[in-house]
Image (cartoon, rainbow, N blue to C red):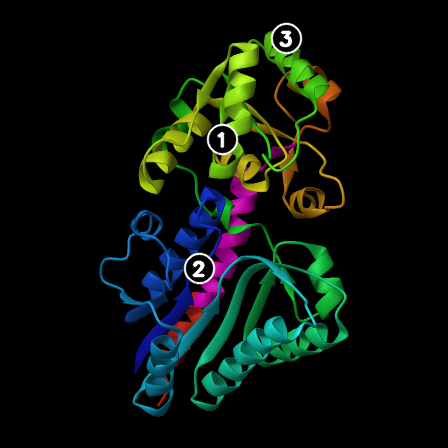
Amino acid sequence: MTVVGFCSILAQEDNLGDVVIRQEMLRVLRECCDEVVVFAGRAGRSYRASYDLDGTTVVTRPWGFQARLLRTVVGRERPLLVFAPGPARLDGRPRALLKSLTNLANVVLVRLGGGESLTLGRAVRGDSRAGRFVESASVRLQSLYVARDEVTRELLGPRVRVGPDLALASDDGASSSGRRKDAMVLSFRGDRPVDEALVRDALEAARRTGTRPVLVTQVRRDGEQHARLAQVHGIDHVAWVGDHREQLARVTRAMLSARVVVSDRLHALLLGARNGAVVVPVSTPASDKLPTTLAVLPTTEPPGDVGALLAPLGDPVAVDRRAARAAVDEVRALVVARAEGLKGGS
């Protein structure tokens, strides 16, 4: 039996963290599906080019995606519908509720057609009773629902499996362990002024740890503030210049050289952690994203005296990359097993 995977790559186009976790999702689907149908909507050319979409079926209109899913359900193929990783809001407003109901209807449709529906790496928040009811119903009908934090399981129930964010599925090359790690990467949200005292403390910590401070823009909208900080403090800045693929390559090079990453951006921390950096999360007002996601990750002790030297900045975290990758691999194996089960069905 032919298995057709369905997913969406729609996300914040200026956020490379969203690109990385969706790349990992696509990698799993390519591994286990005979065909992969990707909904790209009105995403820009640069954003779409950051994914390796060769060999996939790219659909840009919602009705086209829906029609392809329906044809698979009623035909001789089997659908594997995967909801993308990242945050999701339980919202009772009509437009948001309609989207949630559409997703639930697709889960029901896929199940009636003998297929499977899965969610990978969600972080659900919100207090809408209607939104929670719809998402909980979807959880019960899906074959696998993986969250990246315990809060999501508390909201939606024990059927939710908790595991590391998909950014930890791999590192950025076999050579990463042999590279010189001499940088302290700094990356801050641009939608609020950065704490200048924190920046000064970070520069002092860089001096104490013998690392080279560098500002890295992995979310385009953070670039303006980073440029100002770079000028004021006379440090390097990996600015967003060019298209998504080029910027992802620049950010990756910076993370491969990072011994430490200090950030209030989740995926700046995780892109560093997946390449062996010790990460220092900077707390964000009214958001639990960083502590709840990092709490799931297996950790080790920071090497040498790095932990003590970084303590003035916050609580340094050294992720056990091997254990984190093994946990993500367990989820990948479950997805592959589901697809193999569909192929063996009649």
Q: Sequence order check: which comes first, mark 1 or mark 3? A: 3
Which stretch appears magenta?
Answer: 317-335
Q: Quadrant of the N terminus?
A: bottom left
- Kind of residue sitting beneath label 1: Gly
Residue at (72, 29) in percent of width and height: 315
Residue 208 has which mark?
Answer: 3
Residue 239 to residue 99: above or below: above
- Kind of residue sitting beneath label 2: Leu
Quadrant of residue 100 within the rendered picture: bottom right
Residue at (59, 38) in percent of width and height: 265
Quadrant of residue 148 within the rendered picture: bottom right
Residue 223 has which mark?
Answer: 1
Say if residue 212 shows up in the picture.
Answer: no
Q: Quadrant of the C terminus?
A: bottom left
Q: Sequence order check: which comes first, mark 2 or mark 3? A: 2
Q: In x, y percent, where is residue 69?
A: 37, 81
331 part of magenta stretch = yes
Residue at (51, 14) in percent of width and height: 231
Q: Is residue 255 left or right of residue 147?
A: left
- Kind of residue sitting beneath label 3: Arg
Q: Sequence order check: which comes first, mark 2 or mark 1? A: 2
Nearest to the eye among marks 2 and 1: give it. 1
Q: In x, y percent, where is residue 11?
A: 47, 55
Category of crowding for the residue at label 3, using alpha-carbon neighbours closer than 10 angstroms: few (below 14), some (14–19), many (at least 20): few
Q: In x, y percent, where is residue 223?
A: 49, 30
Q: Is residue 74 left or right of residue 283?
A: left
Category of crowding for the residue at label 1, using alpha-carbon neighbours closer than 10 angstroms: few (below 14), some (14–19), many (at least 20): many
Residue 295 to residue 339: above or below: above
Say if residue 329 shows up in the picture.
Answer: yes
Q: Main secondary structure of the magenta part?
A: helix
- Disc 2 target residue: 10
